[in-house]
Image (spheres, rainbow, N blue to C red):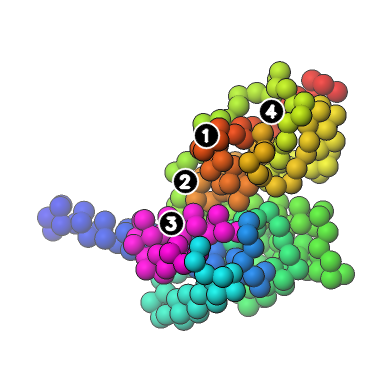
Amino acid sequence: MDDNIADAALGRIHGKSNYWKAVGYWIGFLKGVVASRAIEEEEKVALVSHSKELFESFQDGDAFDVLEDLDGLEDEDMYELLEQVISVRSSDEEYRENVKLTVEFCGFLKGIACDSVITLDEIKTLIEFISLNEILLDDDRISDIYKASRLAIADGIISEEEQEEILTYISRVVGDSMADTGISTSRDIPALEGMLQTLEGYDFQGKEVVLTGTFCMLKRIFWKFLEEQGATAKKGVSKNTDLLICSEVGSEHYVTPNAGTKILRAIDYYSSDGQPEFAMEHMLLNLMENKL
């Protein structure tokens, strides 16, 4: 066989494989987004990013519809659209033949965690997903998620500590799986314009600071320190945010199509307003060690 023909055939095979990875991940992501039984405002930025990436890479019609209708439809109608897309694509025989369960599940985890909040409905849907696909439990990381989730819903209330624990487990699966599936590794958050190299000498007085991701200690410990430095700790990113500090967990996978809502929103604000600036967890830890 001519080498050029062989190369072209191989390219088509790889292209098809990458397409099904991207579609499977996107459908899983949509399942995660609707798991809360609603579309949260904080999820919309990530929904746009993932849909835009799929459309631009593969001209996927459903992704285009989501992008086109997101601003025009009421949340309830958008929820119904996503449910319809999920139902049609998931029941398609070609989809079932080509999409790996692990890829879809990775997208699902990203969908429920993209707003850094885990609700009771999301936990129940997560448990149901794993229960219907018990082969996933062969992965110890997923088994940890399953155990933590079952414990969390025992009292019918998801505490902040339980959310942090589950988000930590999810970040391990999503982070590692990004490398395995080859999905989106195009832009590293630490290289963003506006990323500081150190927090030594940073003037926190009167600044609004937001933490995003799963940190090595409870966030309230960091919040207390920041407030002692004169900063105001906020949970959400806004136009008034001066500094966004990102956790180290999964930082090698902080890329714009897959980053959490806080990071995506901060990127948009920085592009238009020049703030907030970015810093990493280790910079804050170093500063704390020097101050204490």
Residue 120 visible in the picture: yes
Mark 2: which amino acid? Thr
* Alpha carbon distance from label 1 to label 3: 20 Å
Q: Earlier in the sequence, mark 1 or mark 4?
A: 1
Which residue is rendered at x = 53% and y = 59% of the image? 47
Q: Of helix, strand and loop, which one carries label 4? A: helix
**Mark 2 vs mark 1: in front:** 1
Identify the residue position indicated by label 2 in the image: 185
217 within the magenta span = no
63 within the magenta span = yes
Mark 3: which amino acid? Lys
Identify the residue position indicated by label 3 in the image: 52
Whether label 3 touches label 2, CB < 8 Å: no
Q: Which of marks 3 and 2 is nearer the N terminus?
A: 3
Q: Main secondary structure of the magenta part?
A: helix
Specify the quadrant that holds the N terminus: bottom left
- Magenta-tinted stretch: 43-70
* Alpha carbon distance from label 2 to label 4: 23 Å
Report the front residue among 114 and 136. 114
Give residue 50's position: percent from left, percent from top: 48, 57
Which residue is rendered at x = 71% and y = 18% of the image? 201
Label 3: how many residues lie within 10 Å, few (<14), some (14-19) or many (20+)? Answer: some
Specify the quadrant that holds the C terminus: top right
In this view, 132 is above or below 158: below
Identify the residue position indicated by label 4 in the image: 283
Mark 1: which amino acid? Leu
In this view, 273 is above or below 105: above
> Residue farthest to the top?
201
**Mark 3 vs mark 2: in front:** 3
Which residue is rendered at x = 59% and y = 61% of the image? 111
* Alpha carbon distance from label 4 to label 3: 33 Å
